[in-house]
Image: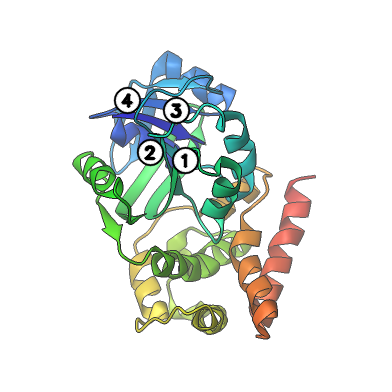
Amino acid sequence: MAIIILGAGAVGSVFGAKLSQHNDVLLVARKEHADRINRDGLKTKGIENSNYRIKALTNINEIKKNTLILLATKVHDSKNAIEPIKNLVKKDTVILCVQNGLGSEGIVKKIIKDRCLVLRAVTNIGAVYLKPGIVEFNGHSYTAIEKSAESGKIAENLSRCGLKSYVSDDIKAEVWKKLVLNCVINPLTAILGVRNNGIAGRKYDGLKSMIIDECLEVAEKEGIRFEMNFLKTMNEAIKNSNNISSMQQDLLKGRKTEINFLNGAIVKLGRKRGIKTPVNWYITGIIKEMEGITMN
């Protein structure tokens, strides 16, 4: 299958590396990263030490028939990534939005309209951009793909390449589950300057619970209900995770974070539904202040 990774940062690079084992993969990345990959290959560290020979570009001017595009940019970069290719996609093109937060697929659909199929996906993957041409791969547990006629073969392809995937009957619930976890892990690790396992202990359980409770109250008003214990599930999942959250990576690089699509989205929806979300509001404000410092 022809696959384009649109936004080959940490996560996109790992997806591209793994998928290149059985597919014709093209990475679209920043110039320094693309140049190094073309010269030396894409190197992975962490749970695997490999070197993948993949073609990388900074932009594309052609899309082959039956191409799968994995959109792995930050959500706020979706428009800038999709606008240049909207007239290049074909009816048989599939765009799979593998991004965090709420609303990423909506941004893409608004631009693409009925030109091709746009699907949402949710993934749990640990990846860190180390330097041009090198990423750290810290693990992948699943990728859930929105149900469609094309989704089955996409899930099979990813799974064959070592990225366990399945077609979800309720992608909205998958998105919200990941959102709740991200609303805790991303900002807290970024604020505290620790890796994911740094917030796994009971020390921060009170704060984590307050964030979760507000998220779940808003989710319920959106028609999403969960039976799971989010705090217990999260603590168990990250206790051995040495990954650096994407939000902390963004702040360390002086880049804009996805806070508006995580805790900020909870605040916005809460306001719309008449629900107070003071903890998420404060968390959003702190990250925005940190963005102002690191981006100057």
Element marked by disc 2: helix
Label 2 sits on residue? 14
Residue 8 image offset from top left, x and y in percent? 48, 34
Q: Quadrant of the C terminus?
A: top right
Three-letter amino acid code of the residue under disc 1: Ala
Distance from disc 1 to disc 4, alpha carbons, whole Å, reads 14 Å
Q: Using a 10 Å C-alpha cutoff, classify the residue at mark 4 as few (fewer than 14 neighbours), some (14 to 19) or many (20 or more).
A: some
The reply to whether callout 1 and callout 2 are in contact (CB within 8 Å) is: yes
Label 3 sits on residue? 27
Three-letter amino acid code of the residue under disc 3: Leu
Distance from disc 1 to disc 2, alpha carbons, whole Å, reads 6 Å
- The residue shown at (55%, 44%) is 113
- The residue shown at (37%, 25%) is 65
Instruction: Please identify, in this view, whether the residue under mark 4 or under mark 3 is nearer the observer.
Output: 3
Label 4 sits on residue? 52
Distance from disc 2 to disc 4, alpha carbons, whole Å, reads 10 Å
Q: Earlier in the sequence, mark 2 or mark 3?
A: 2
Q: Earlier in the sequence, mark 4 or mark 3?
A: 3
